Image: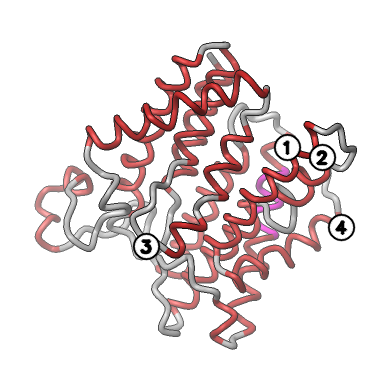
Amino acid sequence: MTIDVGHLLASFGGGIIGAAIGGLNSFIMTGILVLAGVAAGFFDQPQAGAILNSVAFGPMFGPHIAFAGGVAAAAYASEKRLDVNAKDIGVPLVKLNRPDVLVIGGVFGVIGYLLNTLWVSMALKTDTIALTVTLSNMLARGLFCKEGPFGTLTDDLKNKGFVGRFVIKEGYCWLPWQKDFMQLFVIGLGFGLPSGVVGVATGQPVLAFGIAGAYLIFLAHKPGFPVVHHVMLPAALAAHATGSVLMGGVFGILGALLGELAARLFYNYGKSHIDPPAVAIAILTTIILFL
């Protein structure tokens, strides 16, 4: 495991950025920068790799650094009773005027860099960034909310045991407009098939991720917008790997279903944010890389 000291230090800053502007907003920037990096690559610009690896997925806006830092800072701020909901990852926490909140983001930025570097050095067959985001979110919940990854069921569901985690209640749902089977099936197919074309035609599956990430800017201002980066990226990856657009549709559906499954397992009854798309992307990327 080789650590780049410059990137390590910059990751502290990246985590602060994620906390300051909000985890969701930092992720939107990731999507925009992915689009810029891929576009630069299409025009044979030498900076293309640097934009993708050192900016979009690097210390400044890498989701394992900035997004994860923003998620952790929100959980910390909530634990400190600073009038912030631990799940509200869109709030720019700089408004709290609390340097300690931002520093927590920085610390988790460093944690994210170290974890991802470890997975890469091990040549782990998965999306190492998505895996790191998942583990970082779980760590933040445990440290600041004193709660396990599955959260805590409401009193009326505790008698149902583990099955209770799959029950949807008002106020305990990730995306109310994106939770029912047929809705998820249609979304997965509808976004997956064109993403398959993106993967096959361009040879750059990450472009689909950039598109899905960038247009979350609409979600930030208009609740009810579809969240589909866990649909479009696996779809593009699968289609690119197989040369089959149909596989894009299949993995798009799997991404949609797995995202909701992860929400019911980890998000809905938890105090803080554990990212359902990151869980789905890590699982499906592993499947694609092995098969």
Element under disc 4: helix
According to the image, label 2 marks what residue? 48
Where is residue 82 shown, x and y percent of the image?
45, 85
Element under disc 1: helix
Q: Nearer the viewer, mark 2 or mark 4?
A: 2
Q: For the residues marked 3 and 2, what is the alpha-carbon distance in whole angstroms?
A: 41 Å
Give the total of numbered labels: 4
Q: Are marks 2 and 1 in contact (CB under 8 Å)?
A: yes
Mark earlier in primary sequence (3, 4): 4
Mark earlier in primary sequence (3, 1): 1
Say which amino acid is labelled 2: Ala
Q: For the residues marked 3 and 4, what is the alpha-carbon distance in whole angstroms?
A: 34 Å
Say which amino acid is labelled 1: Val
Q: Residues within 10 Å of mark 1 (few under 14, many from 20)?
A: many
According to the image, label 4 marks what residue? 6
Mark earlier in primary sequence (3, 2): 2
Q: For the residues marked 1 and 4, what is the alpha-carbon distance in whole angstroms?
A: 24 Å
For residue 147, which numbered disc appears in the image?
A: 3
Q: Residues within 10 Å of mark 2 (few under 14, many from 20)?
A: some
Q: Nearer the viewer, mark 1 or mark 4?
A: 1
Q: Is residue 61 left or right of residue 242?
A: right
- Up the image or down, 162 lies above or below 96; here it is above
Q: Residues within 10 Å of mark 4 (few under 14, many from 20)?
A: few
Element under disc 3: loop
Residue 112 counted in the magenta span: yes
* Majority SS type along the magenta span: helix
Residue 160 counted in the magenta span: no
Q: Which residues are magenta?
A: 110-117
